[in-house]
Amino acid sequence: MKKTLIGLVISMFWFASASADVGARLGVTGNAALYAATATELDNGTHGTTTDFDESQTQSEYLGLTYASVFAEVGFGPAFVGVDYMPGAIETEEASTTVGDKTTSATSTQVTNTVKVEFENLTNFYLGVRVLDSFYVKAGTLSVDLNTKESLGTGSTYGNTTVDGSMMAVGMDKVLDNGMFFRVEGQYSEFDSASLTSSSGSQKITMDSLDGVVAKLSFGKAF
């Protein structure tokens, strides 16, 4: 899906270069997002001769984020394609859990696990259509790197991963006489699930769901 949209963006840029009704826009965006996330932590307990991820804990949280992004797009007729990119990274608050690590059928040890997640390289490729002069709808793909920063009771660590997703949005914009423009937009985003296993193999964390809404305010220059 992501590769298909990238190819579509490239082909549309090429097609737009031969069109008389072509316009390009560059801008910056302030984003205020509210996400709902559900994650499950699994622990590999040993009971006699059976070893499995049989100790689990599921938790849901709401996550509020503010961040800046930059975008570039080209339009021809009522359609436009573009890419929006968040420089840098944003980090969640640290979450802590204390679990009983049952290593035998009779004994267990209390261990504390702390983890926080860094979102980096959030990228959105999109295709939009103008329904009216100032009103548009758009849809596209998302990609973000998830970097974990953790302290596990076992002393092991999680790795990092990249998660893909999709989005759809509606918005309005206005171009001034000097070519400057402003834009307001509401967006819904949904990411695929992801799973990471600790370096020791004894713990696993799964992001079961991550979706939310984003309010966007943009300023830029139309050419």
Image (cartoon, helix red, strand yellow):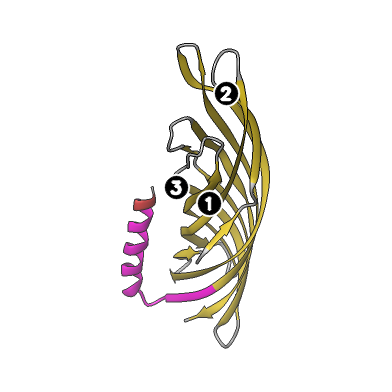
Residue 110 picture location, percent across and down: 64, 29
The alpha-carbon separation of the residues under discs 1 and 3 comes to 23 Å
In the drawing, does residue 8 fall left or right of residue 60? left
**Which structural element holds mark 3?**
loop
Q: From where the camera sits, is residue 41 visible?
A: yes
Task: Read off the residue under disc 2.
Answer: 55
- Residue 61 location in percent, x, y? 67, 42
Q: Which residue is mark 3?
A: 160
Disc 1, SS: strand
Q: Amino acid at mark 1?
A: Met
Height in image: 207 above or below 137? above
Nearest the camera: 81 or 165?
Answer: 165
Rendered location of residue 4, percent (x, y): 35, 51
Q: Is residue 18 magenta?
A: yes
Secondary element at image label 2: strand
The amino acid sitting under disc 2 is Glu
Q: Is residue 96 above or below residue 106?
A: below
Give the mark nearer the N terminus: 3 vs 2.
2
Residue at point 55% right, 77% down?
220
Question: Which residues fall within the magenta stretch?
Answer: 4-27
Q: Is residue 168 above or below residue 158?
A: below
Q: Residue at label 1? A: 167
